[in-house]
Image (tube, coloured by chain):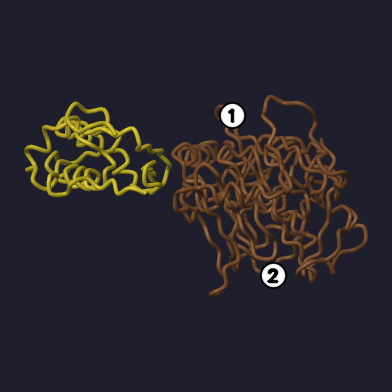
Chain colours: A yellow, B brown
Amino acid sequence: MTDDRADTSTVSELSDEQLLTVRARLPQHVVHRSFVSETVVLNLRTGKYHGLNPTAGRMLDALETAPTVGDAVPGLAEEYGLEQEQIRRDLLALTRGLLERGLIVTADDSCD
Amino acid sequence: MTAATEQLSGADGEEQYRTAFGLELAIDQRVSIAGIGHSPGATARPLSRVRMDDGELDRRWEAIDVEPLRARELRFGETLLLSVDFAEPAGYLLWARDFGRVLISPDGLELLCEPDPANADWARLLAAQALPLAATIRGMEVLHASGVVLDGTALLVAGPPGAGKSSLAAALVRAGGQLLSDDAVALELSGDTLIAHAGSVVLQLRSAEDEQLSADERAALGRSLGASGGKQRYLSESAPDPVPLGGVLLLERSADEPAIERLTAVNPFELIGSTFNLSVRTPSRLQRQLDVVSAIASNGLAYRLRVQPDVDATRLAAIVQAQLAVAIS
């Protein structure tokens, strides 16, 4: 078993503004499936399962397809009828959490 | 439909062909194993060979030059009851106290058996642990559940030990169902469809419950194999062919009247927790495990069954059949 946690110092060194400009994506060793109650994210390297509530699961979907983290904000704000600033805060917190756990990587990172 | 035989016996080196947990098996005639169906004939699946060990197990295990990974162990207090170790290239070494050892090759196609000579019934280890493990390696996802075929589909009953899985399965068999497996059912994802494969069709019923049954009710369960460990064992006449999965009942104790509810928002981790074998942690298996759980949920096959602890199994089976028909419609 390997610890796939990202270098947390690198993640924490990114400012919010910098993080909004990166592209997030799932590495090949991470898969996820959506259920009504939650989204299950599985790291195939560690064998560890992670549960995301439906909103976080939807945000993960948006992160996967958006060119940058920031680009995912307007659509999610419209979808949930919330201010973009609130969505931005929640999305940044989720992105940092996923990056720290190695469940997403930035587009500059190696694939596996 | 495949006949399930109680005993296999014959000359050394001869094999008989059986099918269980989605595996096509060539079993050494010296292995006596109950409740494993006859193979219906050649299929596209490769044969998994179950052989009696002639010293090969030790030779292979001692030849490994890496520290084995302890993939699983089961203890009662301080006493180790079961362990699974993995090391390439030997494979998975399954050991169970008072039963012996089985070395399963990394591809699941060979099972070398080294029985505990003091236990004439050692081969139960095959049906209970070794074959489900081999099936998992071969691409099946095995659920810890009792299973019954009703109206051409498989109804599985999952829940914690002692929840009443076997009792309900027995009652459903008495009501006209056919036993698919007492304890573990192999599921195969074929496109979006889940196919259920029979495991061991030996039903184990608590003796206290068995004593409440009439002679006719016992006869409906199959041929008695006698009692063992406080349980009466019955061998079904035959093992059913693979059938589509019709539902998974997740048992939950409740003070209320028995009731079935289709779960639109099933907890995926409850289903993952019902999968049988956690020794195989390869990426392909982990993804398959999640895919199977996802298919159960997305196809609307998960149901909550709330039951009182002391509910009569025959009455419960009638309620299950009636309410399930309504839930499905």
Is residue B224 positioned above or below A108 on the image? Answer: below
Q: In percent of the image, x 79 and y 49: which residue is there?
A: B31
Residue B185 screen position, x and y as percent = 66, 46
Which is more toward the observer, B169 or B260?
B169
Spatial CA span between label 1 and label 2? 38 Å
Indicate the quadrant where residue B159 lies. Answer: bottom right
Residue A1 screen position, x and y as percent = 37, 49
Q: Which residue is mark 1?
A: B190
Q: In percent of the image, x 35 and y 36: which residue is there?
A: A29
The disc numbered 1 marks a residue on which chain?
B
SS for dot 1: strand
Q: Is residue B154 left or right of residue A30?
A: right
Both labels 1 and 2 in a single chain: yes
Q: Earlier in the sequence, mark 1 or mark 2?
A: 1
Q: Estimate how packed mark 1 is, as few (under 14), some (14 to 19) or many (20 or more) residues with alpha carbons within 10 Å.
A: few
Q: In percent of the image, x 26 and y 28: which residue is there?
A: A65
Q: Which residue is mark 2?
A: B310
SS for dot 2: loop
Q: Nearer the viewer, mark 1 or mark 2?
A: 1
Residue B77 screen position, x and y as percent = 54, 75
Indicate the quadrant where residue A23 lies. Answer: top left
The disc numbered 2 marks a residue on which chain?
B
Residue A49 screen position, x and y as percent = 39, 48
The three-letter amino acid code for the residue at tag 2 is: Asp
Q: Is residue A27 left or right of residue A89?
A: right
Which is more toward the observer, A88 or B159?
B159
